[in-house]
Amino acid sequence: MSLAVTAQTLQTLHRMHRQLADLHERQAVGPRQVLARSAQLKAAEVALATIQGSVKQSKMAADQKQLQLRSSEAKIIDYETKLNASKTNREYQTLRDQIAADKMATSVLQDEILEALERIDTFKCGVSEAEAVVTKSKSLLVQVKTGVDQEEHTLHSEVARIVSAIGEVEQDLPNDSRETYQRTVKSKGADAMAAVESDSCGGCFQKLTGNTLAELTMARVVVCRNCGRLLYMPDSRLPKRVEADSISQKSGH
């Protein structure tokens, strides 16, 4: 097998493996997007539940204070009745003091109830906003899931096509180099190959020895001693004579 065929085969395989890696990455992006949207929805639901809990607690606190207020008001009425029926100055003064104290406590309760009702109104506005966020998050999650499902069908077909094409091109590799190629691809995936750039490995940029460059010019599959990638000469570095021979062989002359 000529240098041109070997180099072009590795170059083609390199390009295909990078395409395949890109497709796999796009396949992985979809589930991550769904996971992110699901997390956003969960956070929105937690926020909604929290503010709903605040509304419930505030209502319970307000109801409790209103019960205390009614009880205090009832006591005041009772004290006022007793005040009118009091027979001694001491009893009269004691009842007046108690009524004054209870009226002050009642006034404080009324203020606290008003504040509680205002907090409830504020929380209710927050509930509406939180519900809107939940609704929007659910909608976005559905949109993302739909888009991911549709794209996954396309990506799955494209992956199958590229894998099949890779298998066909692999048949052009020299038999004695195929095992090295397969082992390297299994280990490094799309990074299994690298073009020679300025007499260096295009993957790790390690300068190549003269012997390594000589092996490459003899149509051998060479492994970079530094990073383990399979090296190939780019089209621009292929000897013109060898390229011509390769074209001639392919045309049947």
Image (spheres, rainbow, N blue to C red):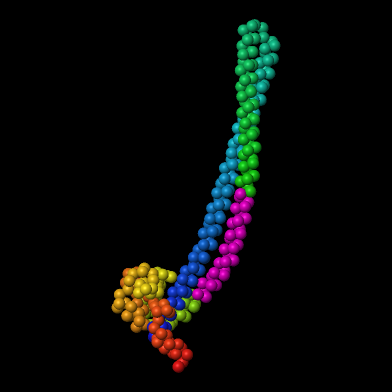
Residue 105 is situated, as x and y percent measured from the top left of the image, at 61, 22
Q: Residue at x 60, y 62 (%)?
A: 146
User: In the image, is residue 81 above or below residue 215?
Assistant: above
User: In the image, is residue 118 above or below residue 219?
Assistant: above
User: Residue farthest to the top?
Assistant: 88
Residue 106 is situated, as x and y percent measured from the top left of the image, at 63, 23
Q: Main secondary structure of the magenta part?
A: helix
User: In the image, is residue 102 above or below residue 237?
Assistant: above
Q: Residue at x 32, y 73 (%)?
A: 208
Q: Is residue 230 shown to the viewer in this render?
A: no
Quadrant the N terminus occupies: bottom left
Q: Is residue 203 shown to the viewer in this render?
A: yes
Q: Nearer the viewer, residue 238 or 183?
A: 238
Q: Residue at x 65, y 6 (%)?
A: 88
Quadrant the C terminus occupies: bottom left
Quick check: 219 left or right of 45?
A: left
Quick check: 132 left or right of 216?
A: right
Quarter holding residue 197? bottom left
Q: Nearer the viewer, residue 169 or 99?
A: 169
Magenta span of residues: 133-162
